[in-house]
């Protein structure tokens, strides 16, 4: 059984996709052990509560230094002894010590086809604004392992989504969520839970 801790910052739509997939059997051999938010007002915490999942808030605002926050944050994660940590719209930089401890056991969902529109400053609506400004015809989402860089870890899954002429950043964001993010994030977790993802030579190897 894969014990998963999900890290969130906002509404928690990707968290909901994971919860729904676990409950429906779309994700097998997996239990959501806990949810941590850096924002006490995140609706994601309410989603966890509704499904009987333990959750808590650990916010940088409650600590005098980033080092103190990082220490408490890592302690909170480790209380659940996770096999996998999932960043589902988590807007806090993961401490290097945690990346090292959980090497190739932390995954992130990013709303673009990496390496396009990724890295520092590309998150949320900013990704979709940049894509529309550039005039690309295809966007999408990527699930990748987390390393010390920003969106630079080994890619596990990607799914493309077509841009439509009338798209605004908000409309495009929603379509990428519905057609890509909410599908490949649960799929990646299921693949990992069933031993179908490995990392070799800095690349993720997926067997289906």
Image (spheres, rainbow, N blue to C red):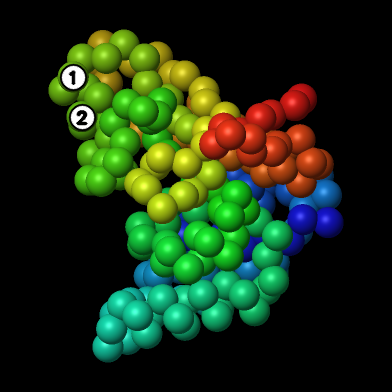
Left or right of residue 76: residue 166: left
- Residues at discs 2 and 1 in contact (Cβ within 8 Å): yes
Return the residue at label 1: 134
- Mark 2 crowdedness (10 Å alpha carbons): few <14, some 14-19, many ≥20: some
Q: Is residue 62 above or below residue 53?
A: below
Q: Position of residue 100 (x, y in %)?
A: 53, 61
Using the image, determine if residue 114 lies above or below residue 149.
above
Q: Residue at x 75, y 26 (%)?
A: 207
Could you say where residue 205 lies in the image, as x and y percent from the top left? Answer: 66, 30
Q: Is residue 71 above or below residue 51?
A: below
SS assignment at label 2:
helix
Query: Which quadrant is home to the N terminus?
Result: bottom right
Under circle 1, the secondary element is: helix
Q: Residues within 10 Å of mark 1 (few under 14, many from 20)?
A: few
Say which quadrant the C terminus sits in.
top right
- Tell me what residue is drawn at x 63 percent, y 68 percent: 34
Q: Is residue 134 left or right of residue 122?
A: left
Which residue: 35% across, 46% down? Answer: 150
């Amino acid at each position: 059984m894969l014990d998963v801790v999900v890290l969130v910052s906002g509404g928690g739509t990707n968290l909901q996709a994971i919860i729904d997939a676990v409950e429906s059997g779309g994700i097998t051999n997996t239990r959501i052990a806990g949810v941590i938010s850096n924002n006490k007002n995140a609706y994601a915490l309410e989603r966890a509560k509704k499904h009987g999942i333990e959750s808590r808030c650990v916010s940088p605002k409650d600590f005098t230094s980033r080092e103190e926050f990082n220490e408490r944050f890592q302690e909170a994660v480790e209380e659940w002894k996770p096999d996998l940590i999932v960043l589902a719209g988590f807007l806090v930089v993961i401490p290097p010590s945690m990346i090292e401890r959980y090497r190739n056991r932390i995954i992130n969902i990013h709303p673009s086809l990496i390496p396009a529109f990724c890295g520092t400053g590309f998150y949320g609506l900013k990704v979709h604004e940049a894509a529309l400004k550039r005039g690309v015809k295809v966007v999408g989402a990527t699930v990748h392992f987390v390393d010390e860089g920003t969106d630079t870890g080994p890619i596990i899954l990607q799914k493309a989504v077509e841009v439509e002429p009338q798209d605004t950043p908000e409309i495009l964001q929603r379509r990428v969520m519905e057609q890509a993010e909410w599908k490949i994030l649960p799929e990646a977790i299921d693949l990992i839970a069933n031993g179908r993802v490995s990392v070799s030579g800095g690349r993720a190897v997926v067997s289906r």
